[in-house]
Image (spheres, rainbow, N blue to C red):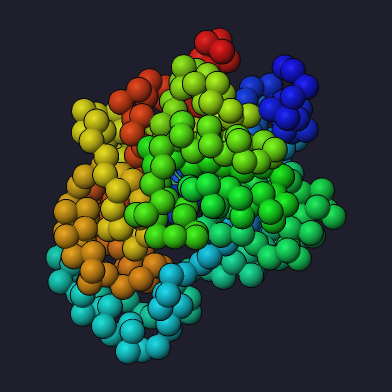
Amino acid sequence: MTTTKHSRLASQLGLELPLVQGPFGGGLSTVELTATVSNNGALGSFGAHNLPGEGIALAIAATRAQTDRPFAINLWVNDHDPGGDDMTPATFERAWAFYEPYFKEFGLDRPEPPQHYHPRFDDQIDALLAARPAVFSFVFGIPSAAILQECRRLGILSIGAATTLAEVEALDAAGVDAIVASGFEAGGHRPSFLARAEDSLMGTATLVRLASTRTSKPIIAAGGMADAAGIRAARAAGADLAQLGTAFVACAESGTADVHRDALFSARAQTTVLTRAYTGRLARGIPSRVIEEFGRRAHELPPFPIHGWFVGKLKSAGLAANIEDFVSLYAGQAAPLLKHRSAAGLIASIRTEL
Ligand SMILES: Cc1cc2nc3c(=O)[nH]c(=O)nc-3n(C[C@H](O)[C@H](O)[C@H](O)COP(=O)(O)O)c2cc1C
């Protein structure tokens, strides 16, 4: 590798390949996947936004037991949309009236209102800083200057995600160590934080190319890559590293359900759509009943994370009965390129082809 800015991040992290395994929220990240990726010369990531502080500490300890290489812990900086932190009984009742028919269909009782619909970022970041992973990656905003300063003091590299040039510039000005340029091809949520996600849809190649003209920070391209050809194209456009998500979700080491993995490898994955139906925030996935029914009623959905909390209960009940109706079939547009079912196999093939 040369000594341009493009190799600094890889050598800082001791990576053998310009490859990052994207973090997955919602329980799809596993310690095994993160450690396997890091042990195979790329950067493993663990998406921890759904875990409380104690869970994050345990995940970091468990990952360290399986690898002595660097890995990233990923959080969602903004843990609710407007109204999404309203814990009043009236809000719960209104939401329950919307979901009750679906709960009845699955034979589910009315759930007890939770203490929070989503763990608090403030609690999560305390646990993360205490455990000091090599990398803290984040989406949906920029942590405070005090948190970023603490990361620098503790030697934790910070990586923020952008979906527009304005977000690239905001992250650059905040002094993060690297920037993920996330194009709309990507599977999972659109992590926009300055404008509505629907108004922040840029393709990976354009975003990476433009970002490379505006920042001297290393750029990690994300969205639409599943093999070495995609990674080469992203690097030609100005990316330092490439972050693959869907290709790793498809691997046996991820925590995803069999119905999801089967869908990723099926002809259905040729069509993916952006929808608020899964959680209330915009995300890309394969059309299914949850998208048809809740996507059509998007204007009626309670805000993130309330909607996601209720859908999560329908998803679990469905999975127990092997029904995919309310399972989020997250997938990026490159899903038809998927070939590998093991993370080591995927990385080995990229290593050979690169
Ligand atoms: C199921 C799923 C969950 C994801 N969850 C997160 C997350 O919690 N945090 C994050 O930074 N990125 C998340 N992502 C984005 C990935 O880390 C990665 O940037 C993206 O998948 C790359 O695009 P690709 O799917 O086309 O490979 C998720 C992606 C998927 C498919």
Please tell me whether residue 31 is drawn above or below residue 338 in the rendered image.
below
Judging depth in this view, the residue of 68 and 162 nearest the camera is 162
Q: Is residue 339 left or right of residue 212?
A: left
Evaluate whether residue 63 shows in this view: no
Judging depth in this view, the residue of 124 and 184 nearest the camera is 184
- Residue 335: image quadrant is top left
Whole-percent x, y for residue 108 in the image: 23, 69
- Residue 65: image quadrant is top right
Judging depth in this view, the residue of 81 and 43 nearest the camera is 81
Q: Is residue 131 left or right of residue 93?
A: right
Whole-percent x, y for residue 165 in the image: 53, 47
On-image quarter of the C terminus: top right
Q: Is residue 293 left or right of residue 220?
A: left
Evaluate whether residue 198 shows in this view: yes
- Which residue: 49% across, 38% down? 207
- Spot the residue most to the front: 213
- Spot the residue most to the top: 352
- Spot the residue most to the right: 153
